[in-house]
Image (cartoon, helix red, strand yellow):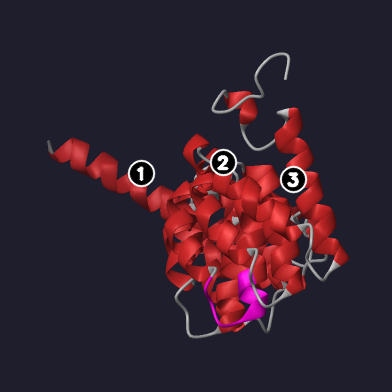
Amino acid sequence: MLVAIIALSSDRITDWIIEEWYLSKLRSVDEAEKKIAAEKLAEMRSIKAVPVLIELFEKEPGEPRHLPYSAKALVKIGEPAVSSLIEELVVRDRIPWRCVSYTLKDIGRPAVPDLVSKLKSDDAEVRRLAAHTLGKMRQGAEAAVPALIELLKDPNQSVRLAVAEAFPGIGKGAKAAAPALVEALRDDSYEVRRTAALSLAKTGCAPEALTRVVEALRKCLEDDHEGVQVNAAVALRKIESGRWGWCSYGWWRKPAGK
């Protein structure tokens, strides 16, 4: 037993030494060394590495859709990095928010609860960014749909617009938002109405809501804004052709010969 305890302690000490060594390499002036260190610390899922990697993220050039190695390491670390990244969305004075958003998107499901909590932030911009990020996730964000539906009533137009845009990116689970999107077709903002119409075309709805959706979209054909009319027409055309929403999953299809 004593030998086993000594061996375990020795392994932990060795891991600690290795982790500290790679952490020191993250501050190297050599980019190749920093990249290797980031990859190794990500494999170790090092919590200590998170703030250092975020510091690198701040300084490292990179387009949002082509995340730099520091961001990729944060994605691999996963859940332990979420709270620190969420804080960057809140502060927004160091790292471009799109880079943070794409990193959280790639982390996926573990980031959803924290993002949902930010949908209730007092800061409208935080609410908007949280909705935007959830709309990029595809898998795992279905749990956010009820909170996003409530946010379609937000007093801030930018937030409502971000929410309306988010539903198609969430996937099949977003069809529950159809009644709320129908209500959004009467929003004071033409941008929200236009986006809601297109989102309905992409997300679809439950069969029992189809009649209401069609009626609402037909009314939009008489909207004062051309963009709303066009998107409503696109949605209606997709319904008529049977190529809308999640029809490939079999929940609704145009009857043969119609």
- Residue 158, magenta (yes or no): yes
Q: Secondary structure at mark 3?
A: helix
What residue span does the magenta drawing correspond to? 153-160
**Mark 1 or mark 3, which has the lower sequence index?**
1
The residue carrying pointer 2 sits among few (fewer than 14), some (14 to 19) or many (20 or more) residues within 10 Å by Cα, namely: some
Going 44% across and 75% down the picture, which residue do you hit?
120
Going 28% across and 48% down the picture, which residue do you hit?
9
Q: Quadrant of the C terminus?
A: top right
Q: How many marks?
A: 3
The residue carrying pointer 1 sits among few (fewer than 14), some (14 to 19) or many (20 or more) residues within 10 Å by Cα, namely: few
Percent position of residue 47, x then y: 46, 60
Q: Secondary structure at mark 2?
A: helix
In-image side of 126 versus 114 (left or right): right
Location of residue 216 with respect to 28 vertically, above or below: above
Is residue 247 in sight in this rendering? yes
| Pointers 2 and 3 in contact (C-beta within 8 Å) | no
Tag of residue 11: 1
